[in-house]
Amino acid sequence: MMTEEQRKVFWGEVKRGLLVGGAVGVLGGLFFMDMRRGLVLGLIGGFFAVLTRRSIEKRRGR
């Protein structure tokens, strides 16, 4: 179970990942594909990037 502080940190990281992923997706949408598709793919990528980063940090013991 996560403590309240850990939960706040987790959701803060998720928000940042979604924001960065969405921004990168919109940039991709401007130049390469449909804007909505770029945004959605960016949000999905940002979410999984956060999960991957947390998994690596947990494995390293940080």
Image: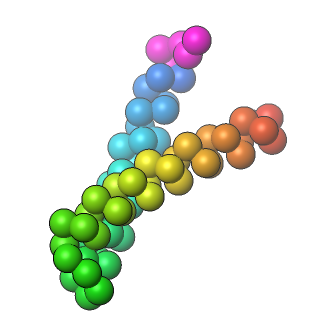
- Quick one: 13 or 38, which is closer to the camera? 38
- Residue 21 in the figure: left or right of residue 39: right
Residue beneath the point at 47% across and 14% down: 4
Q: Is residue 10 magenta?
A: no
Q: Is residue 19 above or below residue 24?
A: above
Residue beneath the point at 39% across and 54% down: 44
- Quick one: 57 or 30, which is closer to the camera? 30
Query: In which image quadrant can residue 19 be found?
Result: bottom left
What quarter of the picture does the N terminus occupy?
top right
Q: Is residue 26 above or below residue 40?
A: below
Q: Position of residue 50 (x, y in %)?
A: 52, 47
Residue beneath the point at 35% across and 62% down: 41
- Looking at the rendered structure, the number of numbered marks drawn on it comes to 0
Image: magenta residue range: 1-5
- Residue 60 in the figure: left or right of residue 23: right
Query: In which image quadrant can residue 58 be found?
Result: top right
Q: How is the image coloured?
A: rainbow
Q: Residue furthest bottom?
A: 31
Q: Position of residue 53 (x, y in %)?
A: 62, 48
